[in-house]
DNA sequence: CGGTAATCTAGAACAAGTTTCAGACTTGAT
DNA sequence: ATCAAGTCTGAAACTTGTTCTAGATTACCG
């Protein structure tokens, strides 16, 4: 319902109207999401190993520590294969973020924010996410830097991440359906602030306290967009 | 009063309490800002040539088109020298942004925004800046990507850019002095939104109209922080 | 002026992301 | 079981940011 658009191998479809991908029909496996190129079990496993290695290396030393050759070796995959699954380092890290976000979403759903107003719940959720990131600052660094450095060629993937984030926030607000355009706009602004505040924190230009203040400030916008529910 | 912290050569001061830099006292030249390492005329000229080449290349093809070897050649400077002036590509592009921002600041001061409320003036100013960026989207791409990709080693320079931006916004609001902490917080959030919205626009994930909406939305925060001035 | 330290130049060398290629292996279909 | 198409592997090559080196130049000091 939320997740889709999984990056996977088999992108180089040149125009020929050839047969469908060889492994195409195989094992429409466990994972609940894949839509575009259905993956073999072994492929699914490879993909998972790669993402795991990526997160692992990122947790060590952030963006720079995720070196494609190392990811390939750690996940027992040839370099060329790695690039077939994720066409660039940024693609890989954005996919990693997607992965982590999904975890976070289910985690948050298990214990939803308890605040009174939507604004409070929103701030609470974001702060919870922030604390999670603080536990793995290097991983956060790798993912966020990749996300904001991504160019047009990664737009679809970045967009997926963005939609996931939006979903989490709307969930938190308790407005998962029927948000007004104004509210969507406010949520977009909140996301902007969230990303940018993370960056200033990661680059050491803002303290944790500062980020908290900024988040709470921007969440006030929500009150501004729904004063008709007293 | 606003600008300082100019990147320049002569950084590799190892601990020795040696004599002051050879060219140190020379020509405390034209430019109004340099503080740390006063530059020779020829050095000032080199620095300018480099920044010009950087902006030029950036205007062509954005971040990727700014290749250090090319910048060096275009500005008739050896690669090593380029790196002495700007210790990395990101440093170079952030300095380029600083440069452009200064232009913009003086431009805006010549014809200040005319809106009624601070919020209106703020939105007006940002939209004017946005239109300026639209005229050189590739340059914008290079500068903004560099800014958000910058790691800790570039913090001082990024911070300078941030202060410049803050100054522009406060100027626009007419609150250049004595802003309350709340207002400063709001301005920080506005900057966050500004940067992040630019990125989504540059990577083709948001339209110009969308950016406008977001900017106007976030500027409403200003009203929220000063309802005591009717 | 002459000396000396710092700066600049040209070019090689190194690092990591990305591409390419030939050959081995899998997969699904006949 | 066999075949054709598509994948994966291993290794080399290419690109661009960054570092290093040796020698020429420049700037300041006495």
Image (cartoon, coloured by chain):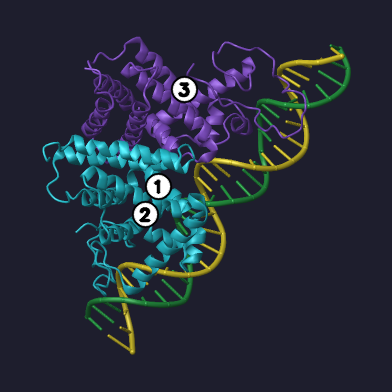
Chain colours: A cyan, B purple, C green, D yellow
Q: Which chain carries label 2?
A: A
| The quarter of the displayed image where residue A52 is located | bottom left
Give the percent coordinates (x, y) of residue A192: 31, 39
Q: In whole angstroms, how far apart are the C-alphas of marks 3 and 2?
A: 34 Å
Rendered location of residue B224, percent (x, y): 25, 28
Residue at 55% of width from left, 24% of height from top?
Answer: B6
Instruction: Report, in whole angstroms, how far the alpha carbon at label 1 lies from the one at label 2.
Output: 8 Å
Task: Classify B22 as above or below A12.
Answer: above
Mark 1 vs 2, N-terminal side: 2
Q: Do the residues labelled 1 and 2 touch (CB within 8 Å)?
A: yes
Q: From this viewpoint, is residue B55 visible?
A: no
Chain letter for mark 1, please. A
Q: Is residue B122 above or below residue B148?
A: above
**A76 over B5 or under it: above or below:** below
Mark 1 packing: few (<14 Cα in 10 Å), some, or many (20+)?
many
Mark 2 Cα-neighbour bin, 10 Å: few <14, some 14–19, many ≥20: many
Viewer-closest of B213 and B8? B213
Instruction: Indicate which label's residue lies in the foreground, 3 or 2.
Output: 2
User: Which residue is at 32% across, 62% downward?
Assistant: A10
Is label 3 on the same chain as label 1?
no
Residue that carries the numbered disc 2 in the rendered image = A97
CB under 8 Å between discs 3 and 1: no
Given residues B225 and D9, the one toward you in this image is B225
Residue matched to label 3: B99
Secondary structure category for the residue under label 1: helix
* In this picture, residue A142 sits left or right of residue A28: right
Which SS class for mark 2?
helix
Percent position (x, y) of residue B86?
Answer: 57, 31
The CA distance from mark 3 to mark 1 is 27 Å
Q: Would you identify the image quadrant in which residue B79 lies?
A: top right
> Which residue in the structure is indicated by mark 1?
A144
Mark 3 element type: helix
């Amino acid at each position: 319902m939320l997740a889709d658009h999984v990056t996977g191998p088999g992108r180089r479809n040149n125009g020929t109207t050839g047969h469908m991908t060889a492994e195409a029909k195989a094992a429409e496996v466990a994972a609940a999401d894949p839509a575009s190129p259905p993956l073999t079990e072994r492929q699914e496993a490879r993909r998972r190993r790669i993402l795991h290695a990526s997160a692992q290396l990122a947790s060590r030393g952030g963006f720079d520590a995720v070196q494609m050759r190392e990811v390939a070796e750690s996940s027992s995959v040839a370099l060329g294969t790695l690039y077939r699954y994720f066409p660039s380092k940024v693609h890989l890290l954005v996919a990693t973020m997607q992965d982590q976000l999904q975890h976070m979403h289910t985690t948050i759903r298990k214990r939803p924010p308890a605040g009174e107003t939507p604004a409070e719940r929103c701030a609470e959720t974001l702060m919870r996410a922030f604390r999670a990131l603080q536990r793995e600052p290097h991983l956060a660094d790798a993912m966020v830097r990749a996300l904001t450095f991504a160019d047009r060629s990664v737009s679809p993937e970045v967009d997926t991440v963005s939609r996931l984030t939006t979903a989490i926030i709307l969930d938190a607000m308790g407005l998962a359906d029927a948000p007004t355009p104004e509210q969507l706009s406010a949520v977009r602004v909140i996301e902007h602030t969230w990303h940018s505040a993370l960056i200033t924190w990661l680059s050491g230009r803002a303290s944790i306290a500062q980020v908290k203040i900024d988040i709470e400030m921007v969440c006030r916008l929500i009150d501004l967009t729904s004063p008709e529910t007293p």
